[in-house]
Amino acid sequence: MKPGITEDGIMKRGRRAAYTLIEVMTTLVIISILFGGVLAAYERVLDAFIDADMHERAMTVAQRQMERLIASRQEPNSVDLMGVDELDPDFEWEMTLKREPLPGAKPPVSLPQTVIVATVTVTQVNQRDLAYEDEEEVNTEGVETKKVELVRYFPWLTPRLGETIAVPLGPEVFEEPAWLIELRQELGREPTLDEIIRKLGLPMPEELEEMESEIPEESDEKEPLQPD
């Protein structure tokens, strides 16, 4: 007997396997979930690669500006302390110079007890700002600005033209006198100029004016000599 034929000689139809609509939709959902996970992982890897590339480029810009300072040993002018990198215009840089006391230096601090701290900060130029630089307002709220900082220490730098000291000592380096600390503690705030004058026992400006007014004016006319 041939397969598919009954004893009565009638052809028997075989059942053909088929997918139902529910099975198809379930398969599509599973595939979309798997594809979404793969896509998310790909985006994370791509973002990490872009961040690493941007960090390397920004550090190159910082090193380039710092190497110029190392080579010249010259305190730069104010116009040369910031700008857009000429070789990689996607980044802008800013240099700050500050003189700080050496570790263990006791006040009052002298110049040999200090070191110049040079810091180069590099940020990426916001392309969105450049595209809308003619607009009056650009909403950058929520945009994270990534920075790269490079710090180097210098025992000395050649001062600017007309200056005797490169990066002079700031007022925060010097030790405050005891009387000023006591006066600040008594008042609970920063003292005014008049309060400092009274603390030092100096005359007030109006008292000085009164003292000057009491001084007799000298006459330029000389009295004639009396005959003997």
Image (spheres, rainbow, N blue to C red):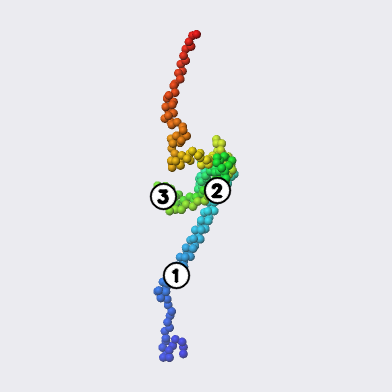
Say which amino acid is labelled 3.
Val
| Residue found at x 53% / y 55% | 53
Residue 114 vertical placement versus 3 (above, below): above
Q: Secondary structure at mark 1?
A: helix
Say which amino acid is labelled 1.
Ile
| Residue found at x 46% / y 35% | 199
Nearer to us of marks 3 and 2 is 2
Q: Secondary structure at mark 3?
A: loop
The residue to which callout 1 is attached is 30
Q: Residues within 10 Å of mark 1 (few under 14, many from 20)?
A: few
Towards the viewer: 3 or 32:
32
Say which amino acid is labelled 2.
Val
Who comes first in sequence, dot 3 or dot 1? 1
Percent position of residue 14, x then y: 43, 83
Q: Which mark is residue 151?
A: 2
Spot the residue most to the top.
228
Percent position of residue 150, x then y: 54, 49
Q: CA distance from mark 3 to mark 2?
A: 32 Å
Spot the residue most to the bottom.
7
| Residue found at x 53% / y 56% | 52
Nearer to us of marks 1 and 2 is 2
Q: Are marks 3 and 1 in contact (CB under 8 Å)?
A: no
Percent position of residue 63, x then y: 56, 49
Who comes first in sequence, dot 1 or dot 2? 1
Towards the viewer: 79 or 158:
158
Residue 111 vertical placement versus 91 (above, below): above
Q: Residues within 10 Å of mark 2 (few under 14, many from 20)?
A: some
Q: Secondary structure at mark 2?
A: strand
The residue to which callout 3 is attached is 138
Q: Which mark is residue 150?
A: none
Left or right of residue 23, residue 117 in this image: right
Q: CA distance from mark 1 to mark 2?
A: 52 Å
